[in-house]
Amino acid sequence: MSDQVTSTISAQHRPQANNLLRRDVRFLGNILGEVLVHQGGRELLDIVEQIRETSKALRAEFVPELFEQFKTTIASLSPEIRHQVIRAFAIYFQLVNIAEQNHRIRRKRDYERSAGESVQRGSIESAISDLKERNIDIEGVQEILSNISLELVMTAHPTEATRRAVLDIHQRIAEDVMELDNPTLTYREREILRDKLLNEVLILWQTDELRDRKPTVIDEVRNGLYYFDETLFEVLPNVYEELERNLTKYYPGESWHVPSYLRFGSWIGGDRDGNPSVTAKVTWETLTLNRQLAIKKYEEKLHELVSILSFSTNLVQVSEELINSIKKDREHVELKCIDLWRNAKEPYRIKLGFMLEKLANTRDESLKGSPMRYNSASELLEDLHIIDRSLRGHFADYVADTHIGKLVRQVELFGFHMLALDIRQHSQEHENAMAEVLAKMNVVPNYGSLSEEEKIELLGKLLEDPRPLTSSHLDYSASTRECLDVYHTVYKAQQEFGPDCISTYLISMTQGASDMLEVMVFAKEVGLFRKEADGSVRCTLQSVPLFETIDDLHAAPGIMKLLFELPIYRQAVAARGDLHEIMLGYSDSNKDGGAVTANWELRVALNDITATASEYGVKLKFFHGRGGALGRGGMPLNRSILAQPPHTVGGGIKITEQGEVLSSRYSMQGIAYRSLEQATWALITAARLAKYPQAQDDAVLKEWEEISRSISETALNKYQDLIFRDPDFLTYFKESTPLPEVGELNIGSRPSKRKNSDRFEDLRAIPWVFAWTQSRYLLPAWYAAGTALKQYAGDDEQRLATLKTMYEKFPFFRSLIDNLQMALAKADLTIAKEYADMISDSTIRDRIFTQIENEYKLTSDMILSITGQDEILDNVPVIQESIRLRNPYVDPLSYMQVQLLTELRELRAKDEDDPELLREVLLTINGIAAGLRNTG
């Protein structure tokens, strides 16, 4: 697109702060314009310009005649031109997103360059300086650091609409655009850079955005590992280094080595809930790929050290410990990489040669236990510590700190398993397998018919009993055999890759204590749980409940109480350090009860489960199953940490990172670092608030919580009146959103439904939110809030004043209101009405759309009254402006999507199809996802 396309976006940004962003957007827009002319002629660029200008004019002032003309222009496009117009807008958004991401990195660098001694808000330094200013001593700081824990868990939830090949092109473009800031570039070098970018945009134009098949699970595993290979292996230790630097600055005299509080985990290759493609074999292959990457990264680092550690014994005296370790290596390891050094006087290079050989041998499982390989990450660490101590012995401490210290941290973080893999399965699968196993052993003929109390009693006895329940001589159904194979795989993995590679088994739809005990009984069968003869318990796998629906959240404290009161289970928790993990689902609770009620019920569950656990001396690690979208609990990482009541973070936090969140947060090192830095700041802040709580009026807090509870109840009724009790709602949803077509977008290996069913209950939360986002309603993220707030406040000025005070002083309520207004700002009911027009029954359409429209207006009015703002998102003007400026470019894609969906569905109603028409629909889905900056 030309200057015309980009000028409106850039001209309305603040003139000084965003000059370089404006330059980048214009630069990339001009290049795209050249590509459009090169590929489709001047006619293509002129059509794109006409549509853009009209869309922009309609956003400035809605004129019915112009609106009809706009739709007529879009409807009159030939399929070939329409296809190219869709791609032009979609690729433009991709380029703008790249420019914005680069600008985030640039802004941080500019701040650090110009700030001098001032401390950036939300930085690691601001967290440590705050502790110092509050006179928290070293012992207090050490206690805070020993108690914080954050694990970010990558999942393969199908919400990333962009192919890996396209993301690779984005990465190259981003690196080239960043080079534009280089002040030493000559005129000729800038011309070469421009040609290179023109070439990349041309490649992007000629690269298919759509997958021609669904990715396999192993494809998804490799996609997840990409972020470790490209950014996280380097960035994560840098965060630790910055924390230790600031601790030394503000608390000198202490030798700081921060515990490993920040790690990454994964579900990819372990999450089998509703995905039959994730088998025990696939899980083992996943673990192997994870280890291969870890070894590869260590080999790269050791090769770097070979070039650096050229210290000669002609000049320095190395440690006797190093010399002895080399002698020991020579006894066991045959070097194949003899050319790594040419000088016998360079012992560090000799030692590194043996280390490289042992790393290579670590891939060979047949050498397990042999001194020819590293049998654990601790053995590699010990070799690094030997080198470190020797370097310090001849005053090469700078080298030790810079190079060895970072690699030590990497080994501590990534081990030989790279990242912890969680297993997840649906509770019903365990019950079915347990019923078959118990029937074959004549323990009970019909386990499924037992009451919950009877199941708990039976499973408790089975855990106490050392005798096995399963036998290799018995034939089991394929599903039961697969269920049992998973536990054998976990046991084998812990032996081969270390106990940290898998230690969590998540149970979807946990509805009773028996769901968790079943997992423990199966764990006992393979040695993951064992009661010894002396009565002690060994447990290397914890069953973790996933409480998802509103009803599950209500039942959660009672379920945990039953488990903690069961002696054998309490012993298993003790064996895990008196720490229990519990997962809370944001997606299904939102789908079940709406945004207001889900947020409230999750807060109540957090508090109630924490109180229950504290009665039994158990610390809790809460696992927050947040998605990227607002309707699935999505928000910036630091805000999601601070959104938790401080006293509930003591045992640590886990948070899911999935789909588009992965590429937006972790595809570039600068952004990955800033995100993890802000997360560290939030963690330390939350830990401080928990240890040194701010004084508050308990009576006032209780009143605010009671008000929130009543608002939640009203919202739940309003939400469920439409979603569950309106007989026409499902028809409205399916016909006014691209839900059926979303399932044809090959973005994940997992089916979009848990069962082959059209029931609302069996629809996964991801396509539910995805479809509402595409059609610009964003309904799950705000619907019912207005009615609930209005019913509480009524026309009572005093009650409205109370809500205003809650917004100012009650973090939960403020977070809720701000999330609601973010959703309202992204929603657009003018365009949503175009989607509603696809509904065949006009009575259903008019009735439900009017209801949604009224609720949208009421919610907007109530939020403006509570916040005192003139417009939605006045509190975050940067995002407000970004949404406002993006809308004219998203709108044409939405109108084209409606037209294409209408044509496609008319064909399919006649049992006909058009693959090219479907392809265009899927292209608009990709484009709208890029424009709105989120998908599911």
Image: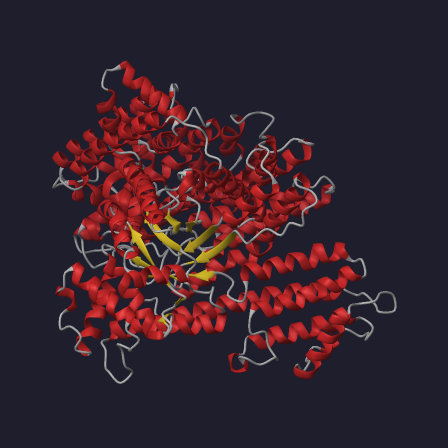
Task: Tell me if I can see residue 186 in this picture.
Answer: yes
- Who's the residue at 31% across and 75% down the image? 466
Counting from the top left corner in percent of width and height, residue 78 is at 34, 44
> Taking 179 as reference, is 587 left or right?
left
Q: On the image, which quarter does residue 701 sit in?
A: top left
Q: On the image, which quarter does residue 77 sit in?
A: top left
> How many numbered dots are placed on residues in this image?
0
> Taking 480 as reference, is 284 left or right?
right
- Who's the residue at 38% across and 49% down the image? 622
Considering every residue shown, the one lying at the far front of the view is 534
How is this picture coloured? secondary structure
- Who's the residue at 64% across and 65% down the image? 300
Task: Tell me if I can see residue 274 in this picture.
Answer: no
Q: Nearer the viewer, residue 842 or 660?
A: 660
Q: Is the residue 668 above or below the residue 218 in the image?
A: above
Counting from the top left corner in percent of width and height, residue 185 is at 72, 43
- Who's the residue at 31% across and 53% down the image? 546
Q: Nearer the viewer, residue 846 or 153?
A: 153
Q: Is the residue 291 above or below the residue 6 in the image?
A: below
Q: Is the residue 407 above or below the residue 129 in the image?
A: below
Q: Is the residue 841 above or below the residue 524 in the image?
A: above
Q: Nearer the viewer, residue 131 or 578?
A: 578
Considering every residue shown, the one lying at the far top of the view is 797
